[in-house]
């Protein structure tokens, strides 16, 4: 972890509060310096008597900087790791909000388009009895997979707007 940048007051406080107990704490613990500092500042290892809100605010500021630095390291580590093969694959089966396999819903959309070509998303929603927000993500996935296509446009009877119609790709 890259050391956080502290103000002179924060550094002085750390030297006084942690410096005096660090050697002792290191002798009884295998934790890193910053993990021990966090515990000291949280009053878990060496209880400190706080007499003012300013002291608590100072400690909270130091904790925030330390935790932020640790989190930055964690994020950098995660982002530098290669993705597992299954996350690189386009064959991921997305789960819907209720845990239903999205591929089943995709199949239902394809079947509906095979029996009734040139349906809009709204038409599909009505035909399948789904909410529109259940239809649109599946339609987008199917278009991206090349399993359905935009076949044209038509005027929506409810909204009066021009909407896309869809068709299954054979």
Image (tube, grey):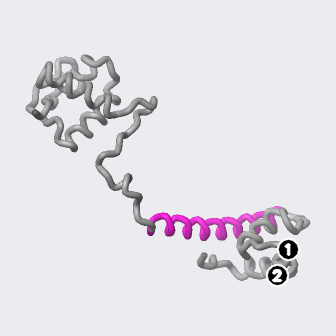
Question: Residue 77, position in %: x, y?
Answer: 51, 68
Q: Which residue is mark 2?
A: 19
**Where does the image place residue 125, in percent across and percent down from the top left?**
27, 22
Q: In the picture shown, does residue 94 fall above or below 155?
A: below
In the image, is 118 to the left or to the right of 27? left
Q: Is residue 4 visible?
A: yes
The quadrant of the picture occupied by the N terminus is: bottom right
Q: Is residue 83 magenta?
A: no
Query: Quadrant location of residue 150?
Result: top left
Residue 98 at x, y = what percent?
A: 45, 29
Q: Give the mark, 1 or 2, whose residue is nearer the N terminus.
A: 2
Q: Label 1 vs label 2: CA separation?
A: 15 Å
Q: Does dot 1 land on a helix, a strand or a loop?
A: helix
Which residue carries the number 1 mark?
Answer: 28
Residue at x 79%, y 62% (from the top left corner): 42
Magenta residues, start to end: 53-80
- Tag nearer the camera, 1 or 2: 1
Task: Check disc 2 and report its element: helix, strand or loop.
Answer: helix
Q: Specify the principal SS of the magenta part.
A: helix
Q: Nearer the viewer, residue 115 or 137?
A: 115
Coordinates of residue 170 in the picture (x, y in percent): 10, 33
Mark 1 neighbour density, 10 Å: few (under 14) some (14–19) many (20 or more): few
Rate crowding at label 2 as few (under 14), some (14 to 19) or many (20 or more) other CA atoms within 10 Å.
few
């Amino acid at each position: 972890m890259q050391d956080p940048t502290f103000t002179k007051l924060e550094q002085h406080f750390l030297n006084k509060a942690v410096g005096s107990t660090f050697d002792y704490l290191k002798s009884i613990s295998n934790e890193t310096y910053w993990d021990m500092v966090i515990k000291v500042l949280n009053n878990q290892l060496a209880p400190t008597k706080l007499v003012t809100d300013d002291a608590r605010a100072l400690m909270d500021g130091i904790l925030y900087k330390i935790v932020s630095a640790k989190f930055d390291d964690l994020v950098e580590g995660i982002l530098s790791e290669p993705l597992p093969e299954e996350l690189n694959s386009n064959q991921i089966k997305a789960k819907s909000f209720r845990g239903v396999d999205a591929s089943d819903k995709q199949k239902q959309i394809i079947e509906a388009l095979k029996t009734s070509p040139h349906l809009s998303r709204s038409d599909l929603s009505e035909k399948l009895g789904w909410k529109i927000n259940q239809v649109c993500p599946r339609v987008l996935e199917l278009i991206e997979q090349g399993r359905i296509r935009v076949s044209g446009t038509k005027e929506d009877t409810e909204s009066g707007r021009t909407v896309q119609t869809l068709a299954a790709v054979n």
